[in-house]
Amino acid sequence: MSHDQTPQSAPQNASVDALPPVKQHARQYATVRQAHETELIEDYVELIGDLLTHRGEARATDIAARMGVSQATVSKMIRRLNELELVTNRPYRSLFLTEAGHAMAKASRERHDIMLNFLRALGVSDDAARIDAEGMEHHVCDETLDVMQRFIAASR
């Protein structure tokens, strides 16, 4: 079927959700766009927090290796995180989280852990759960996280 033709009836496997009203649909996409804007920042801050917790320091070389990116990419993000007042750094020294950075790292870690444990409770393999949780953690609302936490608690 070409793009300019309209189907006569919905296929049997069509989504059970009807097309939402325009304002609701726009709100859904706006929420996703906002999540995409913040997810990389949250990933970096979360990793910096994890490195500080588990290694005692967070160096650009460690971040680059763990994120699978170049040191130049990390340097650009560190500048952005500095501008956002989430990290502080001095040349040739470890990065440190500001109070706002600590709060973001803690919240990101908590969301990540809930998502990871939820996927594990569903029976998803550890490798797949770790990969999926990394992206999904940025795209669920607090209500969904609360339901996931209750599911995890009930499944124990």
Image (cartoon, rainbow, N blue to C red):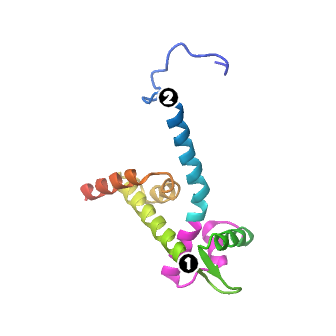
**What is the magenta segment's predominant secondary structure?**
helix
Percent position of residue 132, x then y: 49, 54
Image vertical order of residue 91 relative to residue 63, above or below: below
Image coordinates for residue 88, horizontal then vertical, percent: 62, 80
Q: Residue at x 48, y 71 (%)?
A: 103
> Mark 2 — residue?
19
Q: Tell me the mark number nearer the camera, choosing from 1 and 2.
A: 1
Callout 2: SS:
loop
Q: Amino acid at mark 1?
A: Thr
Image disc number at residue 11:
none
Say which amino acid is labelled 2.
Answer: Leu
Q: Is 71 on the left-hand or right-hand side of 53?
A: right
108 lies left or right of 148: right
User: Is residue 108 located in the magenta-colored stretch of the structure?
Assistant: no
User: Which quadrant holds residue 64?
Assistant: bottom right
Q: Residue at x 55, y 64 (%)?
A: 42
Which tag, 1 or 2, sits closer to the chain's start?
2
- Name the one closer to the observer, 98 or 135: 98
User: Which residue was labeled with disc 1?
Assistant: 98
Q: Where is residue 10 drawn, in percent x and y?
A: 49, 19
Residue sitting at the far front: 23
Q: Are marks 1 and 2 in contact (CB under 8 Å)?
A: no
Query: Which is nearer the eye, 39 or 15?
Result: 39
Residue 65 lies within the magenta run = yes
Hey, which residue is sitting farthest top in the picture? 8
Relative side of 129 to 35, left or right: left
Q: Which residues are magenta?
A: 43-70
